[in-house]
Image: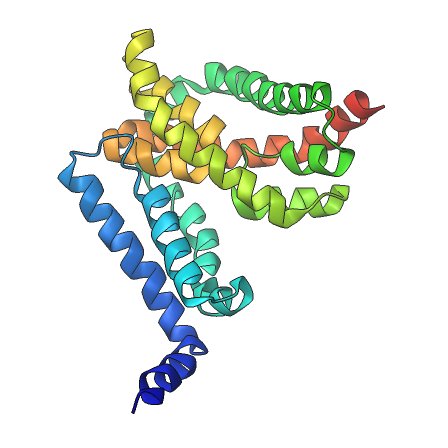
């Protein structure tokens, strides 16, 4: 009889639906906790969900490839979710057009700063070239960042981790930082976090204010394009 629960677990652990359920369940629990704390920045639902899933994988000795086989459907939805950000963009198109020139200036300056600051600091600390390349697109949404890294000879898996950390840290810091700076313009607040912290920061911006979320989504999408164009040139200049 004692072997039956173990045999059942072995069977379920190989079923993709199990890990999809675990992923969604972990996020629901984390989101409930975040809601109960009135969306406190420290109770970030993405971070808490990652910790919960990691504990489950560690406790069940499940490898990442087995987990990802079930969770990859969520990964696939990153693309449609990014495209869906066009809806609030369209609804606020008049506000966006009025701020187009400042947005473009902030986009270029922010994109270059995100790349150069990270690479230079890591270079001063003696980080190997492959890790430098993997670190450079940390402020870009994960699917684009991993593609850029793979093209330039970095490690896409490492980039995915760095992108996630950047997003989580940015989403935790954004509200207290903007409040401390006295920044009250929701357009500027949203654009800043979307530019620096991509999708996770954008999700946080939508929790705070719909207009901030709209501008965060714009920044996230445009930064992916600008970084893909500028990063090879900037890395060549820095690493040469």
Q: Quadrant of residue 123?
A: top right
Q: Is residue 108 above or below residue 78?
A: above
Q: How many marks?
A: 0
Check the image and name the residue furthest to the front: 2
The percent position of residue 238, horizontal first and vertical second, equals 77, 21
Q: Using residue 123 as the reference point, say whether residue 38 is left or right of it.
A: left
Q: Is residue 175 above or below residue 220?
A: above
Quarter of the rendering occupied by the N terminus: bottom left
Using the image as rendered, state which of residue 220 and residue 238 is in the foreground. 238
Residue at 69% from the left image edge and 30% from the top image edge: 231
Residue at 25% from the left image edge and 35% from the top image edge: 207
Q: Which coloring applies here?
A: rainbow
Q: Using residue 229 as the reference point, say whether residue 89 is left or right of it.
A: left
Q: Is residue 1 above or below residue 77?
A: below
Q: Quadrant of residue 194?
A: top left
The percent position of residue 13, horizontal first and vertical second, equals 42, 75
Check the image and name the residue furthest to the right: 240
The percent position of residue 201, horizontal first and vertical second, equals 39, 33
């Amino acid at each position: 009889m004692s072997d039956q629960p173990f045999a059942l677990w072995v069977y379920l652990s190989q079923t993709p639906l199990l890990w999809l359920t675990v992923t969604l369940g972990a996020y629901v629990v984390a989101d409930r906790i975040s809601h109960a704390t009135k969306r406190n920045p420290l109770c970030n639902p993405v971070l808490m969900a990652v910790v919960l899933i990691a504990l489950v994988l560690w406790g069940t000795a499940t490898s990442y490839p087995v987990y990802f086989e079930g969770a990859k459907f969520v990964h696939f939805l990153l693309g449609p979710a990014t495209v869906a950000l066009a809806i609030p963009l369209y609804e606020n198109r008049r506000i966006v057009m009025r701020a187009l020139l400042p947005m473009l200036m902030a986009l270029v300056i922010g994109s270059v700063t995100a790349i150069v600051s990270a690479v230079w600091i890591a270079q001063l600390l003696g980080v190997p070239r492959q890790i430098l390349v993997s670190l450079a697109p940390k402020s870009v949404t994960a699917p684009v960042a991993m593609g850029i890294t793979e093209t330039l000879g970095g490690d896409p898996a490492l980039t995915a981790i760095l992108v996630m950390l950047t997003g989580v840290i940015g989403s935790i810091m954004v509200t207290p930082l903007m409040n401390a700076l006295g920044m009250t313009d929701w357009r500027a607040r949203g654009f800043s976090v979307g530019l620096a912290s991509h999708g996770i920061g954008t999700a946080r911006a939508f929790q705070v204010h719909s207009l901030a979320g709209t501008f965060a989504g714009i920044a996230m999408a445009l930064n992916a394009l600008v970084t893909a164009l500028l990063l090879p040139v900037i890395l060549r200049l820095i690493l040469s």
